[in-house]
Image (spheres, helix red, strand yellow):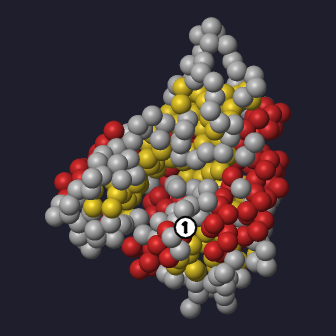
Amino acid sequence: MGRNAQPILLAGLSIRMLAELAVRAGYDIVALDYFGDADLRALCPSKSLRRDYGLPYTAANLVDVAQQLDAAAVVYSASLENHPDQVARLAQGRQLLGNAPDTLTRVRNPLLLADCLRAGGYRFPETAPATQPPSLDSGRRWLWKPWRSGGGHAVRFWRGQQPETEGVFQEWLSGMVGSAAFVANGQTAVLLGITEQLIGQRFAGAAGFRYCGNLLPPRLPRDELHALLQELREMVRYLALTFGLKGVNGLDFVWHDGRVWPIELNPRPTASMELVDTAYDLRLFEVHVQSFAGHLPTFDLETVVTDGRAAGKTIVYARQAGRVGDTGQWTGWGIRDIPYPGEAIGRGQPICTVLATADTPAACREKLKAQVARLRAVCFQDAAVTS
C-alpha cells in the first residue's frame, strides 16, 4: 500500500532518481519526464514527452501533458525551477509539494540572492548584470552565466565578447565546487548532506563547466569538512527563513580559502539526493513530503560525514554517436537512467548514470572511473554506430 490515496505526480526533465526514492519510501506515484528511460518505465507508471508524445522538451510541453494526468499532489524537479509561471500551472488543482512560484522568482535571481546573503553577513562572489560588464584589467577572471541555466550549461569564461543571451557576470573563484542538500519547513532547515561536484571530468565525457556527478562527502581533510559543515548549517537556516523555503533544496558553493562562497540556490530536489538516501539510510522523499506539514528530521550529519561510507554518481556522456547494445544487465552494474537496447545516442548526449559506494570518497571516484571504463567497453558493442 502507498502512503497516499491518490498518486503523487513527479515531473521534470529527468525524473528517475526522484521516482526511485519515492518508491523506496512507499509512495504511489506517476512520473512524467522527457527521457522515459527503461528503468523508470520498470519502476512505476510513467509518461515521456519524446517517447509517448513525440514532443521536444520545454517546460510548457511538460505541463501541458501533466494536466492530463490524475494526481492529488505534485513534486517538480529540474528544470522547472526556472519557470515559475509553469509551476503555477502545474499546481492547479493539486497540492504543490515544492516551493511556490513567487519563491522561485526570488531565489533564482542571482543578484537578489547575492544581496540577501550579503545582508546576512555571508559571502557571495561579485556578480553583475549583463548591462554592467566587468573590467578585464583587474587581474580577476569572470564567468558568463545564463539567467536560466542548469548543470553548467553554457557557463564559460568571459573574455570580453558580447554576451549571446540574458545572464550575469560572476567572478570565478578557485577551489572545490560543492553542493549542500538540506530540507526546510519555511522557518528553519536541517542540513542533510554535503557533496563535491564533479565538473567537466574527462572520464565522464564532459568538458568545461558541465556537471557530471557528485561525491559524498567531499574529498577534504576532517577539520575542513567540519568547518564546512558548521558554516553551511547556519547558512541554510538563514536562507530557509529569508525565502520561506520548503522541502528538499540544494545550495551550490565554492570552498575557497577555507570559507563557503555560495553561488546558486536550487529550490527543488537535487541530484545528490540519492547519494544521501543511500549512504545515510535516510528516506529523503518522505523527508521532503513531511516538511510541508512542518516536520523536519532529527539528523546528526556531524557524525556520519566523517564516519559514514562514501557514495558517488557520474553521468556518462557519449564520446561518439552510436546505438547501445543489450542493456538488460545494466541495473546490476550500478547503472541508472538506462536507455533501451538499440537506442541512438548522439555525441555529447548522456548515456546513463553510474552509481558507486566505497569506504572513502577518493576510492569512490576511482570506482566510478573503473565502472565507466567497463561501460564504455560494451556500451555500443554489437550495435551499429550511427552516422
Q: Nearer the viewer, residue 176 or 271?
A: 271
Q: Residue at x 41, y 65 (%)?
A: 337
Residue occupied by mark 1: 55
Q: Locate residue 263: give its quadrant.
A: top right
Image coords of residue 117 (percent x, y): 77, 36
Furthest residue toward top? 137
Asked which secondary structure carries label 1, the reply is loop
Q: Locate residue 55: give its quadrant.
A: bottom right
Q: Residue at x 40, y 52 (%)?
A: 349
**Callout 1, which amino acid?**
Leu
Q: Residue at x 65, y 75 (%)?
A: 66
Image coords of residue 285 (percent x, y): 59, 70
Q: Nearer the viewer, residue 373 or 327?
A: 327
Image coords of residue 213 (percent x, y): 44, 49
Instruction: Locate residue 378 relative to residue 204 in the image: left or right.
Output: left
Can the viewer see residue 110 in this picture? Answer: yes
Image coords of residue 362 (percent x, y): 35, 42
Instruction: Locate residue 280 relative to residue 185 in the image: left or right.
Output: left
